[in-house]
Image (cartoon, helix red, strand yellow):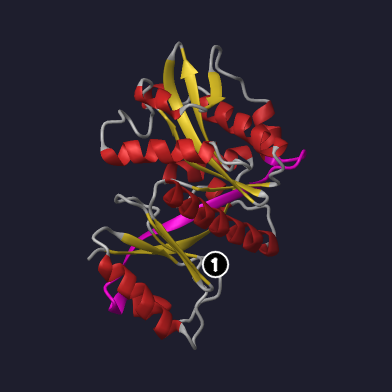
Amino acid sequence: MKKKTENHNPFSAADQARFALAYEANAAAFALALTEAAGGETRREPDFALALFPYPHSISGIYLPRFTGDNCAERLKLVQEIANQQKKKLTFRIGPAPQPSDLTERLVEMGWRKAITQKYMAVPLATASPLLAQLTHRPTLEGLNIYPVEDYATLYQKRHPRLGEINSAKKRCLVEAYQRLSEQNPRQHWTFLAELDGKVIASVGLFLHQNSLAGFDLLVLPDYRRLGVGSAMLRHIAQFASERGASLGVLASSIEGLHFYPTLGVAHTGAYPIYSFTR
């Protein structure tokens, strides 16, 4: 049986549709920006976007598909030609936009397989935000220091909770791409770290697109969970986002997050399938 926190949703159907489109657009903008910063290949078509990161990475794939029954076969043929040329796994994100009813069947026929169902969540970031209201009354762990990374070279000395030791070409490529994104004006991407007693114990990535701020890869090291670290980071970045004009926070959620985030006023607003293809 699903927990009530996952099912509770205070938002209207119109709001949920708006949140879904904002999440999809933000995910696509981030994938394209990071791929370009890493020296990868991107492509923007009228009815889809493509990101090809230089190394195997989950952001490589098709975003914002807007196929119709009239052009579906032709556009999928183009997508398949691109996929066949790649030696790394690609994903095809079937977002909330209307699609031909047989799109998934066509993908399966071409060799694509359903990988996961991406669940996404959202919360308004206005002054009366339920997230900010809930977080304001949560205790902060004494001595916790939360800050944005400005010089990503420090990650070679400070072990990043998600990336670990920066000891591979792919990780070095990511760090360099993050640095380039941090130097863009206007800036859209930030990595926040949380330190306690000089040790990095948590991290989260942010990407600002239009009026939405996406949070991704929030991770607290196991020994420091259930101490209020995640809540403190969310409070910090929610305030950070509001100060930069973001009126909506969106994020992809893990299974654990589906039960944690709703206690803070973040609602599970929907899901969509992601298909993968490996040559």
Q: Which span of residues is magenta-colored? A: 108-130
Question: Visible in this render: residue 105?
Answer: no
Depth order, front residue of 111/132: 111
Left or right of 138? Residue 32 is left
**What residue is drawn where x is 63% and y is 63%?**
17
Frontmost residue, 223 versus 59: 59
Q: Is residue 245 left or right of residue 149?
A: right
Q: Residue at x 45, y 46 (%)?
A: 37
In the rendered image, the residue lying farthest to the right is 127
Residue at the disc numbered 1: 96
| Relative image position of residue 265 (x, y in whole percent) | 64, 42
Front residue of 187 and 127: 187
Identified by mark 1, the residue type is Pro
Residue drawn at (61%, 57%) of the image: 22
The spot of residue 55 in percent (x, y) is 30, 49
Whether residue 121 is in magenta: the answer is: yes
Q: Quadrant of residue 200?
A: top left
Q: Is residue 37 above or below residue 222?
A: below
Quarter assignment of residue 161: top left
Classify 54 as above or below 16.
above
Image coordinates for residue 236, horizontal then vertical, percent: 62, 29
Q: Is residue 177 visible?
A: yes
